[in-house]
Image (cartoon, rainbow, N blue to C red):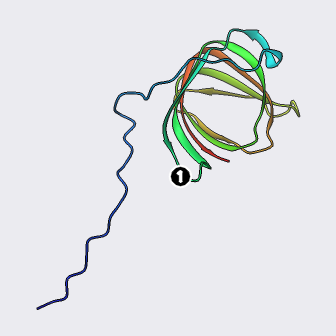
Amino acid sequence: MPEHTPALRFAPLIDFAGNLPPSEPYRPLAERILSGDPVQTAHNFYSSADGHFHCGVWTCQPGKWRVVFTEHEFCQILEGVLVVTGDDGASERTFRAGDAFVSPAGFTGIWEVIEPAKKVYAIYE
């Protein structure tokens, strides 16, 4: 009789198609807001056990604010239009639904949401 090998156990998949996890609206720090009222939500679907990796869905209303990234973040824009400008001034980019980009740790600059935006994010700290 063949030897029985126990089945491997896998963690369940996280499906973003379900209901959004709860989130309270928030804003950037007041001293970082340059214009508008960028009310945001972050619906975090998953955080790793060590707290270094997070992913979910973020929304934001129109506004403009300074950013300082201490983490690496991948973004896939689902809705809206936003402009990201690095402090070097040479790296201004406009992103729309379907676009994807990475903000590496250490990035500083300005985020401006032109039309209400929604993105999927994956963050590594």
Q: How many marks?
A: 1
Image coordinates of residue 113 in percent, x first then y, are 66, 18
Q: Which residue is the site of mark 1?
A: 49
Q: Amino acid at mark 1?
A: Ala
Q: Is residue 19 left or right of residue 4?
A: right
Question: From what the image shows, is residue 14 above or below residue 21?
Answer: below
Q: Residue furthest top?
A: 36
- Residue at figure coordinates x 72%, y 20% from the top left: 28
Question: From what the image shows, is residue 90 above or below residue 51?
Answer: above
Q: Is residue 15 left or right of residue 97?
A: left
Q: Nearer the viewer, residue 88 or 28?
A: 28
Instruction: Indicate the quadrant containing the N terminus: top left, top right, bottom left or bottom right.
Output: bottom left
Question: From what the image shows, is residue 121 above or below residue 20?
Answer: below
- Residue 16: name its quadrant: top left
- Residue at figure coordinates x 69%, y 13% from the top left: 63
Q: Residue furthest left?
A: 1
- Residue 87: name its quadrant: top right
Q: Residue furthest bottom?
A: 1
Image coordinates of residue 30 in percent, x first then y, are 78, 14
Image coordinates of residue 46 in percent, x first then y, are 48, 42
Image coordinates of residue 20 in percent, x first then y, are 41, 27
Query: Quick one: label 1, few (<14), some, or many (20+) residues within 10 Å?
Result: few
Q: Determine the secondary structure under disc 1.
A: loop
